[in-house]
Every structure is written in C-alpha cells, then in structure tokens.
Amino acid sequence: MLFDLDGVLVEARPWHRLALRQALAPYVEHGIKFSTEQEIEMEGLPTTVKLDRLGVPEHLRAAINEDKQRLTLRLIHQNAKPLDNIVDTLVRLKLEGKRIGICSNAKRATVYACMWRTGIVKYIDLVLSNEEARFPKPDPCIYQMALSAMHIPASEAVVVEDHPVGVAAAVAAGIRCVQVNGPEDVSYRRLCEG
C-alpha cells in the first residue's frame, strides 16, 4: 500500500497554503501574488514548482522556500494529531502483513514531522519525498521508485491519493489507485473495496 501524505493520511493542505501565503507576503512589492485560484490550481505540487509557476525571481526562491518550510513545520507541530480512522486502517493493514509506504511531493522534514506528530511512523516501511524523487508527481517516478524499493510489481500495489496530480502519477506507473477526498475518507473497508 502506497499512500500520499497531505490530504490522505493527514490534512496538511491548509497548512501548506497558509505557510506559502505567509512566506510570499513580504515580497508583494515585487509583484508576487498567490491567489485562491492559483492555490487550487497548484495544489499537490512541490513549493519549488509553485514558485517557478508564480514567476518568483530566481534570487528570491531559496529564501521564500526556506521560510515556507519553517512555517509549515511550525503549523504541523501546532496542529497535527492522530486520526483514529487512519491509525485503525494502518494497524489492520499491518496485521495482514501489508507493507506500507508514503510517497509525497512534500519535503522530507515535513513528511517525517507529520508521521511523528500523528503517531503513524511505526506503521511505515518506506518513505519517499520530493527530495528522493527525481521528478515530482504527476511524473510516475516516485511510485516507480517505491515499487523498486519494495520489490513488488505494479500489479500487486495500491496507491491512495486525494489529488489528480497524484492519481496521474499512480496511473502512469501502472498502479491501481483509490482516490479519496481527504483523510476522513480513508478506511480499511474503502481500501479493500477499491
């Protein structure tokens, strides 16, 4: 079982949006704006891709990216908590002998902070972030890496995703995908029914 993180195992999407808005705020004078429409359009993409699409000048990107990461981690530590349905689902999958991986377009520090704060770290066998994958989703790279690392064919894997970007990556990797609307949709029954 391969899970996306944000919007699947933890509801971190609002934290990412808020952190990016706050990181961009000091640069409004440079003409950088991040509208609600852009937030929706670029959801699920790494910050570096968002900054590129927003036209942020190259010399400002590192500082904005660093501020966004710091703010995101703060929000995770303030807000992330275990979700009973997620823990129950992961426990049941582990009892069946399933291996569980997380494949996220988020930074490694963000992924691990979420796993520790929600208590799911003990159920996870593999973690791949945007720092391990050569190309971000919707490219299938991260899911292909997971299949290789876990030594399983695509036909034996299942991906759980909330966003079309991740669904496209799973489909391109040839893996069956269960799409959810958010962490509240994740359940053992739902994953077994497909």
Image (spheres, rainbow, N blue to C red):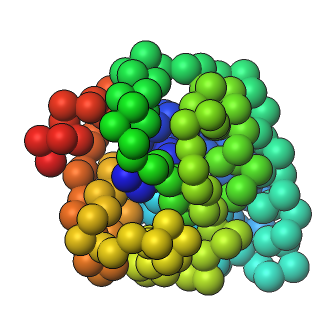
Count of residue discs: 0
Image coords of residue 135 (percent x, y): 56, 81
Question: Does residue 133 appear to the left or right of 78 in the view shown?
Answer: left
Image coords of residue 28 (percent x, y): 74, 58
Could one spot residue 21 in this view of the protein? no
Hey, which quadrant is residue 147 in on the image? Answer: bottom left
The residue under the point 15% across, 48% down is 194
Question: Does residue 31 appear to the left or right of 150 in the view shown?
Answer: right
Camera-nearest residue between 107 and 174: 174
Q: Residue furthest top?
A: 84
Question: Does residue 130 appear to the left or right of 164 in the view shown?
Answer: right
Camera-nearest residue between 85 and 125: 125
Hey, which quadrant is residue 192 in on the image? Answer: top left
Q: Is residue 170 above or below residue 57?
A: above
Q: In this view, does 106 lie above or below 79?
A: below
The residue under the point 65% across, 48% down is 111
Image coords of residue 136 (percent x, y): 53, 75
Camera-nearest residue between 47 and 7: 7
Question: Does residue 140 appear to the left or right of 65 in the view shown?
Answer: left
The residue under the point 60% across, 76% down is 133
